[in-house]
Amino acid sequence: MLYAKLKSGYTISSTEGTNNIFAIYDYLAPLGYTKTAVAGMLGNVMKESGLNPWLWEGNEVNYSKGYGLFQFTPASGYINNCSDVSGYGPSLDVNNPTPGATSDDGYAQLYVFDTDRLGKWVPSCWRPYWDSSQNPWTYTMTQNMLLEYGGFISMSEFRSMDVLTYATMAFLGCYEGPSDKTPAHPEYQTIDENFDDRYNFAQQIYQILEPYGGRDNLLVTLKILDTQHKRKFNSI
């Protein structure tokens, strides 16, 4: 099961945060994700939402801003177009859970990510609005990564990644694509600095996942996967 709350995120070391790390891995592993890929993804998720499936950007409901584990932006893309996904149940209020809200909404969000339901995956990875001169480290790393992968990174290639820096950057560039704020913005970070935060989280999460054998969420995970993908998953 996943934990969710109305405001703010969890820390990695909290009971809820660690539980969500294991639950998300148990969901993604049968779909072919390595621990490295999951840790790289979750390093980004930690930066975006603190591992909280119900988090609204700024702790306020705004369909034009971000929502959920991945901070789908605009939130309306997920809220209005994914209600048919098994597990769907966002809380549309940050003070009291709305009718039908369930923490299983996190599993619906994972399905939407894995199937790229919202068409957010960008195989070229580097965003044209990121200034390469301001972000020399991530720019160089991304160019080297793209050379290794033939110029583009597919979701299938991301799932099988075994280099944590690549997995973290591939998710940042190919899926998350945060804005490159100007120095005048109060939350200004270069992409280099933004990546450092995400990679530090990814390292911590990998250390938690590395010895983990899976199966803590076996029955819940298999039931959700069976329903979402309309095929039988026999094991994790």
Image (cartoon, helix red, strand yellow):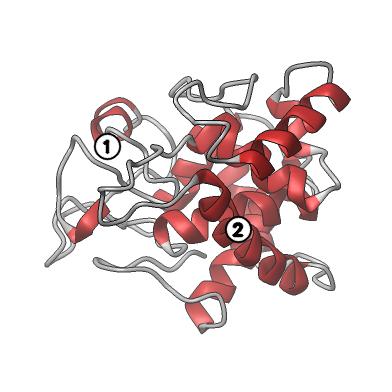
139 vs 124: above or below? below
Image coords of residue 177 (percent x, y): 48, 34
Between 134 and 73, which is closer to the camera in this rendering?
Answer: 134
Say which residue appears at 71% left-offset and 66% top-offset.
203
Outermost residue on the front side: it is 133
Image coords of residue 35 (percent x, y): 78, 55
Disc nearer the start of the sequence (2/1): 1
Q: Which mark is residue 196?
A: 2
- As drawn, is 140 to the left or to the right of 179? right
133 vs 8: above or below? above
Hey, which quadrant is residue 230 in on the image? top right
Between 100 and 174, which is closer to the camera in this rendering?
Answer: 174
Outermost residue on the top side: it is 151
- Give the residue type at disc 1: Ala
111 vs 102: above or below? above
Image coords of residue 54 (percent x, y): 32, 57
Say which residue appears at 66% left-offset and 34% top-offset.
139
- Give the residue type at disc 2: Asp
Q: How many marks?
A: 2
Image coords of residue 122 (percent x, y): 57, 21
Between 36 and 109, which is closer to the camera in this rendering?
Answer: 36
Say which residue appears at 42% left-offset and 34% top-offset.
85
- As drawn, is 98 to the left or to the right of 5? left
**Residue beneath label 1, please?**
75
